[in-house]
């Protein structure tokens, strides 16, 4: 899932300012918000 270089991802952040990568085709997990638009994995990193 997270190794697909062709997929788009969101950089997500929670209330504790922890960041993660999340697939754009999935609902965001509770307590997390997108920090910008969906991008390629390389662009997110």
Image (tube, helix red, strand yellow):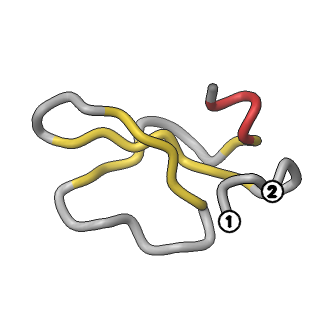
Whether residue 40 sits left or right of residue 35 in the image: it is right
Name the residue nearer the viewer: 22 or 34. 22
Callout 1 crowding tier (Cα within 10 Å): few <14, some 14–19, many ≥20: few
User: Dots 1 and 2: beta carbons under 8 Å?
Assistant: yes
- Label 1 to label 2: alpha-carbon separation: 6 Å
Q: How many marks?
A: 2
Task: Name the residue located 53 percent from the left edge and 73 percent from the top edge.
Answer: 26
User: In the rendered image of this protein, does residue 36 appear above or below residue 38?
Assistant: above
Whether residue 12 sits left or right of residue 40 in the image: it is left
Task: Name the residue located 42 percent from the left edge and 40 percent from the top edge.
Answer: 20
Whether residue 20 sits left or right of residue 9 in the image: it is left
Callout 2 crowding tier (Cα within 10 Å): few <14, some 14–19, many ≥20: few
Q: Position of residue 11 (x, y in %)?
A: 49, 39
Task: Name the residue located 26 percent from the left edge and 53 percent from the top edge.
Answer: 32
Q: Residue furthest left?
A: 16
Task: Name the residue located 84 percent from the left edge and 48 percent from the top edge.
Answer: 5
Q: Position of residue 16 (x, y in %)?
A: 11, 33
User: In the rendered image of this protein, does residue 27 appear above or below residue 41?
Assistant: below
- Viewport quadrant of the N terminus: bottom right
Q: Position of residue 34 (x, y in %)?
A: 40, 46
User: In the rendered image of this protein, does residue 11 appear above or below residue 28?
Assistant: above
**Label of residue 37 in the image:** none
**Label of residue 1 in the image:** 1
- Residue holding disc 2: 4
Asked which secondary structure carries label 1, the reply is loop
- Viewport quadrant of the C terminus: top right
User: In the rendered image of this protein, does residue 42 appear above or below residue 4?
Assistant: above
Asked which secondary structure carries label 2, the reply is loop
């Amino acid at each position: 899932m997270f190794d697909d270089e062709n997929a788009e991802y969101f950089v997500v952040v929670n209330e504790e300012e922890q960041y993660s990568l999340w697939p754009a085709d999935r609902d965001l997990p509770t307590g997390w918000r997108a920090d910008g638009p969906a991008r390629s994995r390389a662009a997110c990193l």
